[in-house]
Image (tube, rainbow, N blue to C red):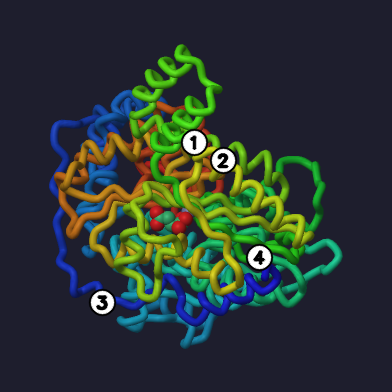
Amino acid sequence: MGNRRATYRLLTHSSKPLFNRRWNPFSQSQILLRPASGFRNCFDENYRGFQPSVESQKKSFLSCLRLLRDHRGTIGSGIGIGNGIQHRCYGSMAGLVKRNPAFSELNAEDIRYFEGILGEKNVIQDDERLMTANTDWMRKYKGSSKLMLLPKSTEEVSQILKYCNSRCLAVVPQGGNTGLVGGSVPVFDEVIINLSSMNNIISFDKVSGILVCEAGCILENLIAFLDNEGFIMPLDLGAKGSCQIGGNISTNAGGLRLLRYGSLHGTVLGLEAVLANGNVLDILGTLRKDNTGYDLKHLFIGSEGSLGIVTKVSILTPPKLSSVNVAFLACKDYDSCQFQRLISGILDGSLSLLVYVSVVLSGILLSSFRFRIRLIILRLLQDAKRKLGEILSAFEFLDSQAMDLVLHHLEGVRNPLPPSRHNFYLLIETTGSDESNDKQKLEAFLLRSLENGLISDGVLAQDINQASSFWRIREGIPEALLKAGAVYKYDLSIPVEKMYNLVEEMQDRLGNVAKTVAYGHLGDGNLHLNVSSPQYDDKILAQIEPFVYEWTSKYRGSISAEHGLGLMKANEILYSKSVETVQLMASIKKLLDPREILNPYKVLPQSLISAC
Ligand SMILES: O=C(O)CC[C@@H](O)C(=O)O
Ligand SMILES: [Zn+2]
């Protein structure tokens, strides 16, 4: 079954891309931002107006950062980006962030210049295409760019950037526009540089498995190409039908295979990037080992196009292995399993009264659902890592709210398990080269987990169709959420033992006002905490933020595990990074992009870069 799985999933997704980007943003109402109240400091003033007060101008960059850090608990509810963005969805961004007045405005001469280098058909001013390019996949963020450029080569990207830098025209690099934090759409009138015409595979070495390609290659096309060659991409995600490898690298996308193949910081061997001034940085190495100086490619992996535009990439791809198995499991109630084992222990005389009493007492303690779930999940993950070892390739989870949403909103999706109320579902995948051995290993693991009461039910895919339908449940959650109405998205790295505590605290905070939906890459410690409600609501957002960021920070987690900071979380970076770190980031930004034309208002707090 395994060797057909990749092909099957590919067909499924390419025939119906998950991230369908057709919509009519004008059908949505525009909601205005409520101005911040009560919280004023240099950061606040700088950010909202780019017109710092005399007092704030006097403050050094560092003290600005410190102030921001000290007040970060109130920032989410104070100054707008974190707070206001959800309320600004479907509308323009003006009011949230003020346009940097240093940027020029497009004129007819600019258009003529771009037409000269790209040809008329690659200089897009058509309203409908611009509307699509201005709006993100979630329809939350909408810019007002009047121009999209479609370069076909690195040389053309270089000419565009050189010109934009000299004219001080801001740009936003764009791939498949499947981002979830407002990083790939303009905020104001930035020129959109869309890489989709740069979609050539340059080379593939069958011995080393190294693929070199242009940034605009769609991930799913790369997967299909490699499948023919007997290889796979080390990266796989639900948006594969639309997202592009350049965007994946620029956001350091994690996805479903990170547990097995690691992050793009490990699998990307080299890249080519065009800097803000148009210079082409060729670090497109294909070497596994190269310790000559600083490894600069890492600056472009995950910096969301704010330091340069990735134009080519060299990536290490693993061989396709013949045996893939997928299990879909449910965890129900830890207590009942404990109780059953306790009773049978007493009946067969293996438990003394003392042990009985202490077990009953601990059973009362264990009756805390939170504790139960934590134990189950931790044990399962530990066991899976130990017993499945090198063949474990995915360990994904979803809670019952996520399952309900998928079943309700996605056509043709059904729960593979018999109807019963389960609190949790897990999707475990193994990938190996020994069909019978791999299956045996997984079956033994499942049996043990069932006996130990860690799982209450489970099913092992018998063919490629079944495996694919299990994956559809997991990969379909973002789509189902979008169909359900408004969604507040949080993408967090949290120690696994704490992960579900946050979800339940959030449930407690929100009560019946909104649904808390949790799923994610449990094996990587990555929780996708989504709050779903029919409409966006100020009050709901105030319940979520800054609480969610403070909570994550308290446990030294990350407020962006794999989606980036984009526009949504640019101001929240100090929840996860120290003042000194952010200061160094701002200095690097300033060095590589002194006029701040590359993807402005994203990743770092804008006023801090300006103050640097
Ligand atoms: O929508 C989300 O919150 C997560 C999207 C994606 O990273 C996933 O893992 O499905
Ligand atoms: Zn994810």
Task: Residue lying at the far right in this picture: please name it.
Answer: 207
Residue 519 picture location, percent across and down: 42, 50
Q: Residues within 10 Å of mark 2 (few under 14, many from 20)?
A: some
Give yes or no for contact between labels 3 and 4 (Cβ–Cβ under 8 Å). Answer: no
| For residue 589, side relative to residue 538 (left or right) | right
Give the image quarter of residue 547.
top left
In the picture of the structure, the residue carrying the numbered disc 4 is: 312
Earlier sequence position, callout 2 versus callout 4:
4
- Could you tell me which secondary element the residue under label 3 belongs to? loop
In the picture of the structure, the residue carrying the numbered disc 1 is: 496
| For residue 66, side relative to residue 494 (left or right) | left
In the picture of the structure, the residue carrying the numbered disc 2 is: 381
Residue 128 visible (yes or no): yes
Mark in the foreground, 4 or 1: 1
In the picture of the structure, the residue carrying the numbered disc 3 is: 24
- Could you tell me which secondary element the residue under label 2 belongs to? helix
Within the displayed image, which quadrant is ligand 1 positioned in?
Answer: bottom left
- Could you tell me which secondary element the residue under label 1 belongs to? helix
Give yes or no for contact between labels 2 and 1 (Cβ–Cβ under 8 Å). Answer: yes
